[in-house]
Amino acid sequence: MNFRLLIVDDEKNIREGLAELFTGEGYDVVCAENGEEGLRLFNKGDVDLVITDLKMPGFDGKQLMQKILAQSPGFPVIILTGHGTIDIAVAAMRDGAWDFLAKPPDLDHLLLKVKRALETRELFFQHRRMEEEAARKREYKSIAGNSRSIHEIFDVINKAAPTKATILITGESGVGKELVADAIH
């Protein structure tokens, strides 16, 4: 999978330098020079991680991070700043930053932080998919069978369950209509 990073910094040299670094490491990179542009690019929905400067004119990195995390809790946002103090770093981490690094960052350290954040994000999504799959399998525990016909019924249940459609289940007495209704519900 090719990850896409969003780099938000009002300093052109830093923005372009980081873009070149991450592109050279195989990442797709998009850049923004301020928080407003960064949020607009984030809202397109094809960004996997954000690296943002903290202090920018207008819409700063803290505001950008807050808006991103309000939409996507737990989303990895790494804060870079040339105005770093321990108090600011602690506040940023408490507000949900994935990490906080002083400028100029150690590039190997930054690459490692990005890699770990993306791996953790992927593990989170993989875990969520596995939980959803396990929940779907538990729903069918009460329906016995492993024939092609039963698997076709499971397919219909999977298509019907996420919809708001009204479903009519028919069949003879004792064939398990209520079990199918419970699985859809």
Image (tube, helix red, strand yellow):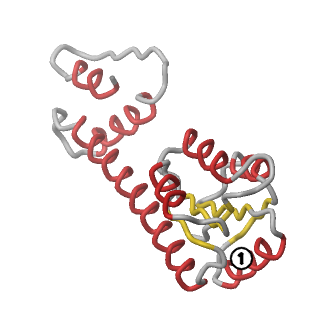
Q: Residue 102 or 130: which is nearer the viewer?
A: 102
Q: Residues within 10 Å of mark 1 (few under 14, many from 20)?
A: some
User: Residue 178's x, y, as percent?
Assistant: 23, 18
Quadrant showing the C terminus: top left
Q: Tell me the SS state at disc 1.
A: helix
Q: Residue at position x 69%, y 85% from top?
A: 24
Give the side of residue 48 with respect to residue 23, left or right: left
Quarter of the rendering containing residue 56 = bottom right
User: Residue 93's x, y, as percent?
Assistant: 47, 56
Give the side of residue 149 with respect to residue 27, left or right: left
Query: Which residue type does callout 1 highlight?
Result: Leu
Where 92 sits versus 12, above or below? above
Q: Residue at position x 54%, y 57% from top?
A: 88
Quarter of the rendering containing residue 26 = bottom right
Q: Residue 149 or 48: which is nearer the viewer?
A: 48
Quadrant showing the N terminus: bottom right
Where 5 sits versus 56, above or below? below
Q: Residue 27 or 88: which is nearer the viewer?
A: 88
> Which residue has dot 1 on it?
18
User: Residue 84's x, y, as percent?
Assistant: 59, 66
Q: How many marks overall?
A: 1
Give the side of residue 118 with respect to residue 146, left or right: right
Give the side of residue 123 with respect to residue 92, left or right: left
Where 51 sits versus 110, above or below? above
Q: Residue at position x 22%, y 40% from top?
A: 138
Q: Residue at position x 21%, y 46% from top?
A: 146
